[in-house]
Image (cartoon, grey):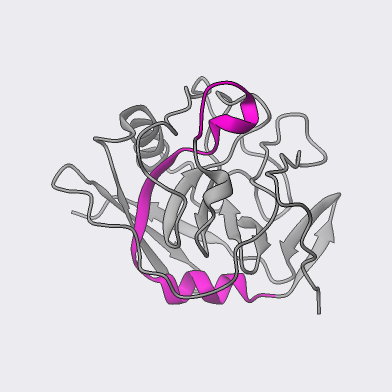
Amino acid sequence: MRIWRKTTLTLVLALLAGCGGGEESPGGEQMAAGQPPLPPDMGSDAPRVVLETNVGQIVLELDRNAAPKTVENILYHVENNFYDGLIFHRVIPGFMIQGGGFTAEMGQRQSPNPELMNEADNGLKNVRGSLAMARRGDPHSASTQFFINLVDNPGLDFTSTASPRAWGYAVFGRVIEGMDVVDAIAAAPTQTLGGYADVPVEMVIIERAYVPE
């Protein structure tokens, strides 16, 4: 069984290996595992997205008021079936699970859209159950990959525009159903595959992503 080793107390921007288009994931010191409450209700302008996975269903609520460009981008990709068949390719217990960019063969699916302006300065925090965008070192390089925080991760929050690290990772939604599924994904054994670390041994596939009626 893999043991996740803590690194430093500062945020580390860990560049995904392999394809030059690969997005960065959040990295660094993980908060102690626990069961803090989910982020607060986001109000009426909050479209939902259902992720049907081979492990179970996850229902997401997106905050269009706080992160309008990010939510518009995610909904575009959902409505065009971009996420169907992709995997959660990076799973770190006590930290986060990441998906939205790679196939089960570890090939990257490319978006036709331009990269996003970082909307991390919106007051939303990287707390347990929150949904945020993955990116590369450039703070404005998020595209389609997202992650779900397993615990409170304040080291991933926006602090200033002074540096790429300080920009943090833009939270744009939360899990409202299926945190048990998220936790089950987080508990899956992982491996290094094709130069990518923390890949589940048994692929966790997003079979379908859609906006419910």
Number of callouts: 0
Residue at (68% x, 29% y) in the render: 137
Q: Note whether residue 56 is visible.
A: no
Residue at (60% x, 63% y) in the render: 31
Quadrant, the N terminus = bottom right
Eyeballing the image, is 205 above or below 120?
below
Q: Is residue 174 magenta?
A: yes
Eyeballing the image, is 186 above or below 68?
below
Task: Tell me: 190 left or right of 112.
Answer: right
x and y percent of residue 117 in the render?
47, 22
Quadrant, the C terminus = bottom left
Where residue 56 sits, quadrant-wise, is: bottom left
Along the viewing direction, whichever of 29 and 79 lies nearer the viewer: 29
Q: Note whether residue 203 is visible.
A: yes
x and y percent of residue 13 in the render?
71, 39
Where residue 39 sits, quadrant-wise, is: bottom left
x and y percent of residue 68 in the render?
30, 30
Q: Is residue 29 magenta?
A: no
Residue at (73% x, 49% y) in the render: 106
Eyeballing the image, is 32 above or below 85?
below
Residue furthest to the bottom: 1
Eyeballing the image, is 154 above or below 138?
below
Q: Which residues are magenta?
A: 159-188
Residue at (48% x, 24% y) in the render: 116
Task: Tell me: 6 left or right of 170.
Answer: right
x and y percent of residue 33 in the render?
57, 73
